[in-house]
Amino acid sequence: MTSPLHLRVAIVGSGPAGIYAGNLLAKAVSERGGSVEIDLFESLPAPYGLIRYGVAPDHPRIKGIVTSLHDMLDATADTSSGSVSGERRTIRFIGNVEVGKDLGLDELRERYHAVILATGAIRDAELDVPGVDLPGSFGAADFVAWFDGHPDVARTWPLDATSAAVIGNGNVALDVARVLAKHGEDQRSTDVPDNVLEGLESSAITDVHVFGRRGPADIKFTPIELRELGEVRDVDIVLHDEDFEGVDPASASNNQLKVMLRTLNGWRDREVGAASRRLHLHFWQRPVQITGDDRVEGIRFERTRIEDGQLVGTGEFRDYDVQAVYRAVGYYGTRVEGAPFDERRGVVPNDAGRVDGEPGLYATGWIKRGPVGLIGATKSDALETITNVVADAEAGALTAIEVDTDILDLLDERDTEYTTWDGWVALDAHERHLGETHRHARERVKVVPREEQVAVSRDGALVR
């Protein structure tokens, strides 16, 4: 009979991938009659990763995801050692700590039976075209981080362009396009910080162009994202009949695509011209050059088509006058110093979550499989990794703990201003209070500066 497992595990990253992994691991060990102590490390003072800092703030369903993640952590999270009973719970959140900087990966591996990397992908993938580095050419990830109030990006954003191009046919491209096209005052009900609200309300934009390399039948949106686009006030959606030649919603490969093609066809019948802003959707266009001397002045595309199953250029080029370009062509993985890394794919090389050649080191989420898939895929992906962690533990393949001291003691020695779950609860309450007392009576207003987040968190948390 296998002895019950008694594990200490570190998870690096507190987005959905890390939280799902911790929750699944706690359940799996508990079901086997064992116990596990999990420390969830986060480089930012607050949890939730891309759910807090990578999704447009006007998505109502995001609130439900945050609530779900909060409940997962709150049910098992350590209350810091200020817990009344003194009993340590299963998962302990340790924020404002960057592994590879504040703590070495080797220091974690000495203190835990297993380390799971869940650092995700927050950098923009590269777009290799001339002019990509001109002022006015932006990565979508940077823009998203700005309007989501990420503490490590600039507080201002240049919104002086009247016409902007968004390159990409995925949900991030739609988020960027919608935020650009939407009137700033219509973001007052969201949790965007005041500096972002001020920037959006003073935007000069009148036209946003979204470009995809393939046709309408190959869009990577989801139906709800597309539907939200059509509900934006005082914005006309402009489509072009030539992009829809031969496109039949009835022959779509799945029901979701069928719904989206019907939505697009319905927009083609709308009258345009009454709105003060326009959002243009273009298909069959591959970017070949961002033009301009000292800054972006335009962008050139080559028309494309499918030939023998392959996307090819037609030799027809079109130029668009724009003053800003947003590249939404994908994300690139976040490297952890000391861990193997595939530079080409932007992932940690692994086999079903087991990091190649590194016993006791695992990966889950986008750093494991690349920046693809939605929340459901992240959960099933975490299950695969955790299944292998448990299997390795039961087989006696995990590394022994070499340093049996609390990691918080090491952070205290280094005067690291880490945050805790109690700190997040305090910051969450503070942001909600800012929303309640705001002149627009909002649900919450995000605190942006890192030092202010840390101060609120540490002042409001129970002292260790």
Image: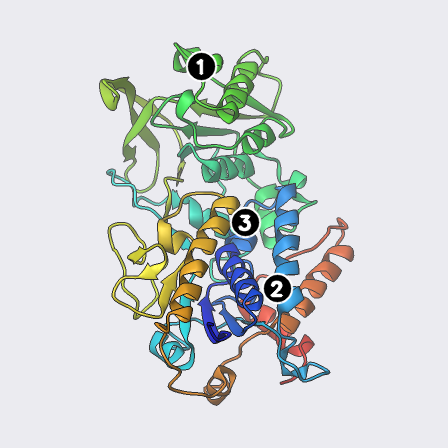
Where is residue 462? Give x, y as percent: 68, 80
| Residue that carries the numbered disc 2 in the rendered image | 73
Sequence-first disc among 1 and 3: 3
Q: Which mark is residue 251?
A: 1
Where is residue 12? Give x, y as percent: 44, 66
Q: Quadrant of the C terminus?
A: bottom right
Is 5 displayed left or right of 445 in the figure? left
Q: Which mark is residue 147?
A: 3
Is 246 displayed left or right of 341 in the figure? right
Q: Residue at x 46, y 71 (%)?
A: 10
Between the C-alphas of marks 1 and 2, the distance is: 44 Å
Circle 2 sits in a helix, a strand or a loop, which is it? helix
Q: In front of the other: label 1 or label 3? A: 1
Q: Residue at x 43, y 22 (%)?
A: 253
Q: In front of the other: label 2 or label 3? A: 2
Task: Assess disc 2: are there few (<14), some (14-19) or many (≥20) residues with their C-alpha within 10 Å of its C-alpha.
Answer: many
In the image, residue 413 sits, relative to residue 389, either above or below, namely below
Q: Residue at x 56, y 44 (%)?
A: 56
Residue 265 visible somewhere in the drawing: yes
Which amino acid, mark 2?
A: Leu
